[in-house]
Image (tube, coloured by chain):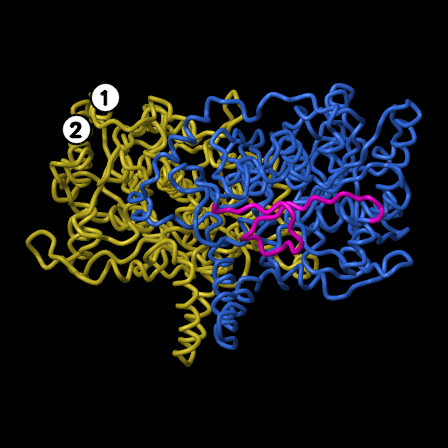
Chain colours: A blue, B yellow
Amino acid sequence: MVATLNPVNHCHQLLSAANHNHACRLVITASFNEVAINDGDKRSNKSTRLAKSISNLLNLYIEKPSLKNFLHRNDWNVVAQAEAKLELPTMSPKEDISSIWRDIHGCSDWENLLDPLHPFVRRELIKYGEFSQATYDAFDFDSFSEYCGSCLFNRRKFFEKLGLTKHGYDVRKYIYAMSQFEIPRWLEKSYVTDTWSKDSNWMGYIAVSDDLESKRIGRRDIVVAWRGTVLPSEWYEDMQRDLEPLGHGEAKVERGFLSIYKSKRMSTRYNKTSASEQVMEEIKRLTKFYKSTGEQVSLTITGHSLGGALALLNAYDAAMTFPTLPISVISFGAPRVGNIAFRDELHHRGVKALRITIKQDLVPRMPELKLDARASPFLKRGSNFIGVHHPETYLHLVDGFVSSNSSFRSDAKRDLALVNKYCDMLVNELRIPAYWYQLSNKGLVSNEFGRWIRPKRENEDVPSPIEEEENYDL
Amino acid sequence: MVATLNPVNHCHQLLSAANHNHACRLVITASFNEVAINDGDKRSNKSTRLAKSISNLLNLYIEKPSLKNFLHRNDWNVVAQAEAKLELPTMSPKEDISSIWRDIHGCSDWENLLDPLHPFVRRELIKYGEFSQATYDAFDFDSFSEYCGSCLFNRRKFFEKLGLTKHGYDVRKYIYAMSQFEIPRWLEKSYVTDTWSKDSNWMGYIAVSDDLESKRIGRRDIVVAWRGTVLPSEWYEDMQRDLEPLGHGEAKVERGFLSIYKSKRMSTRYNKTSASEQVMEEIKRLTKFYKSTGEQVSLTITGHSLGGALALLNAYDAAMTFPTLPISVISFGAPRVGNIAFRDELHHRGVKALRITIKQDLVPRMPELKLDARASPFLKRGSNFIGVHHPETYLHLVDGFVSSNSSFRSDAKRDLALVNKYCDMLVNELRIPAYWYQLSNKGLVSNEFGRWIRPKRENEDVPSPIEEEENYDL
């Protein structure tokens, strides 16, 4: 398990409104303008949110919860519950779902499977959720690294490094994206002049279920996982200012998302083809191969936040090209992507989209499986609009969701500590540090003279378009 | 080398003006009030400082330096210099100073040894500086730990764990302190109800030079290292509101410092005796023993910030009890401790005090060896009033100081990366992350089920008054 420095990024993205050096002052000014110029509910509401967001940042490694609150809290049974889990595996044993995979994949729009949540569905949702979580965990956010914006690991060791081999999938291709427009706070750039790529970021990957997992789930499952960003809702409002037509119908989608999905430039190292083309070409290759072997094939596209938006664009593309392929989208905290016509077209083309949202999360707009952060006894009360948007918070709530009118699942097995990887959501009684997912000494190591230096990346983990284009046997 | 979470503390202390949950809003309001109600230079000056302090906190893991500034900077020779050092030892070979140790120890007030700075003096200053730095590096700041406020390591392994065996000293005793007054933001407390100690904090240690080092430095050197705190200058102004008489003369010292130095209570585990009594008893034991073996003995008391203040109180005590013992104080960024009469008494009793200060540091008041942060080509320009108070910043500038009218020492050997351990002072070109001194995953480890848990402390590192009282052979 390798920790990346997501917290840096998470907050960088939140803060880096403009010149990073003044980010802090900017945000503060903002929050005070709110107080100054607005009035009515909106004002308090929004300024609270901004204050919260600052507080959140400061909390990053600073805030100590009030000693009083801490010692006087009385739900020690929460601690007992948590301790009882410590000696348990983090998942129930796998079930064979080969006979009912189409329902779990959404062929009947998950009717009667969501509320109460069917345990088989829960397990699959968490699997795909962990695939999209992996796009954060493996991303190089370090602006001092010449590989900033790339994936930390070689494709072939991706799941191994992230402790996800348990799901029985293999990564087949990495996805890179750029944008023809300046999209503020989207592209992660290195401060080093000579870098692996100036224009592109690693945006996710395509994986395929191995023989054993394919047997269990009743088909060869192609997964596309799109990386997102943890950004304040304001960012999404910016992204969504202009709609652009898609295809020949009435369908329109947000210009910002489409630009990331479609942009390419010959002069770049990684986007001579667009993210869209990279993904579609690989899906074509894979479906062609597996159909030739007579296997059933499904496409499942997943992503959190921005990643969820790209997943829908990807699904639209795929549905056009592969009319008979069962396609579903499992998105977590995804924003609105297009107009009603876009949604209808997706529907007509048979794309099944399950959006998982948290009531308190400000980003999503068209919720389908509604989670409630207050349902979990392990989460802090009070609004933390960054924390409730975090993917691990989603996975925790999916893990504990039984039905909209019943309490948190008592035998939920997922490791609670994961919730605090990049945020401060767990009650203090659990004594899990906030934002704990970090490298020792930010990756610096001591050389033979006792000097602290930045280690070179393993050769196999250095991004290389050529190496990645290498063919492999299916 | 074990990283502790000082950054947390460093900022916690800075921020925790009152209820930690509102720390952020408090600070911000403050800074904006400044802008609103003050005017004239003072206003901009102070509000800048506060803004800086916030920005500093945000920077903790968030700020990305402006790409423009970074790429357009032109002193790449700074990088070249830094790279040239990477393959060098971090210190020059040790010299035998046995014949001149009294001068280096300050017997003639370091006359003609400071400007230009004598290389032998520089090496000794850095040795004592690293002893006081160690009091931060070994301190448990984790409020979720039941050992918060203690030393992380067993006394016998202290220097080994911190990579300081090279200096040839052995730790003989730990020092604990409490305060009879509520001194805001001084005592580190655990949130866990049942802890190692509710009233006391580990405040430093007493060490003695081993035979080899004693031979090199011409005497058996007893070192007392006092832990400090990295707090904004305002805090010291609070501490210094009331003077209290000391001894029978005119001498008066700050009530806050004296309280930490002198407080005790029978009901406590670690302060049945005061820090003062603990230290004095051990010094008595050690001097008695080494004098009995006919060795020359010296006492060197060191500390940074608050630790420098306690060092002076300790020196005053020691001078009363051991009139013939050569006593010197090497303090880094220490605040004012007492009135003129106190200083004169110290002088009359032959205590040699060398205060090392950085021009830009707002805490100290009676500078003697004046360093200038602008003298180092490796440090960022612009005011960073927290950064310039950090002990590692002091050690870097001592390492590079030649004389007040010459530039930074080109063959300075100390590892530059250390400067950014707890702050953001190095120019970005060096690509050393800010605040990099941190534990992997904040010390959480994955158990056999893949759950992230807080490991138990090694038995030998669990604080125990009994164990620590154990006698040992001198």
Q: Residue at x 52, y 29 (%)?
A: A413
Residue B158 placement: quadrant: top left
Near mark 1 (Cα within 10 A), the count class, few <14, some 14-19 or many ≥20, is: few
Q: Residue furthest front?
A: A112
Q: Is residue B48 visible?
A: yes
State yes or no: residue A373 in magenta: yes
Q: Position of residue A27 (x, y in %)?
A: 54, 64
What segment carries the magenta color?
A348-374
Quarter of the picture holding the N terminus of chain A: top right
Mark 2 secondary-structure assignment: helix
B348 in relation to A29, above or below: above
Q: Residue at x 80, y 56 (%)?
A: A342
Residue matched to label 1? B474
Looking at the image, is mark 1 or mark 2 earlier in the sequence?
Answer: 2
Chain letter of mark 1 equals B
Residue matched to label 2? B285
